[in-house]
Amino acid sequence: MDATITTLPPTLKLKIDLTDEQFFQMCQRNRDYRFERTASGEILIMPPTGSDTGNCNFDMVVELGIWNKQTKLGKGFDSSTGFTLPNGAKRSPDASWIRIERWNALTPEQQEKFAPICPDFVVELRSPNDSLKDLQEKMQEYIENDAQLGWLIDRKNKRVEIYRPGKDVEILNNPTSLLGENILPGFVLNLQEII
């Protein structure tokens, strides 16, 4: 028997008609994959990150978590967390954070699944195979759906794009740290080992 080898794109896009519950169950039954769904219903299947990117993401989430434990201003989330944005898209930022009063306004049932809320703060860490254009569009989508601050960390080009509502994207070349501004007061992300 001859084997056929197929090379798939880094991110696979499928159009399957699923209810929100069916999509949630599919994600639960296939935990080795990371799924997102666009506002138009297109399902994105993303491979796990490489070890180096995963380590950088871990460091980033740890720093956010330490700040959050100290301030108790909200809830922080890692890359395995899905959210249902107001436009209907199901997205999983690499790191995210929601103000405690917004999180507490959700019912326990809403908190249990893909919470119907866009995080106040989102981070996407570009992996070597990620399309910069796709990530930029995703960041814009977060801002259009109520995110107040977003960081697109592009390790390949040693730069960060900062997204804010109603403002042009700010680009920082080879920064050593990022400030959480008034959204994450006092939070500083050290980028020296990330970029």
Image: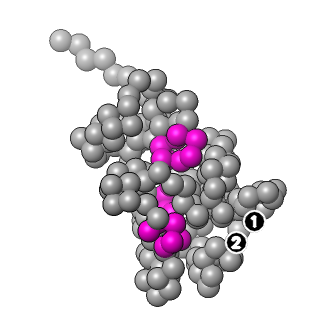
Residue 62 horizontal side relative to residue 134, left or right? left
Give the SS element for disc 1.
Answer: strand
Residue at numbered disc 1:
172
What residue is drawn where x is 64% and y is 73%?
Answer: 183
The span picked out in magenta is 84-104
Quadrant showing the N terminus:
top left
Residue at numbered disc 2:
175
Q: Is residue 12 magenta?
A: no
What residue is drawn where x is 38% and y is 28%?
Answer: 18
Front-most of residues 95 and 75: 75
Classify 193 as above or below 160.
below
Q: Position of residue 51 (x, y in %)?
A: 39, 58
Residue 57 visible here:
no
Give the SS element for disc 2.
Answer: loop
Front-most of residues 158 and 112: 112
Q: Is residue 97 magenta?
A: yes
Disc 1 and disc 2: Cα gap in Å? 6 Å
Identify the amino acid type marked 1: Leu
Q: Quadrant of residue 159?
A: bottom right
What label sits on residue 117 in the rendered view? none
Q: Do the numbered discs 1 and 2 sit on residues whose CB atoms are within 8 Å?
A: yes
Residue 183 visible here:
yes
What residue is drawn where x is 47% and y is 82%?
Answer: 72
Identify the amino acid type marked 2: Pro
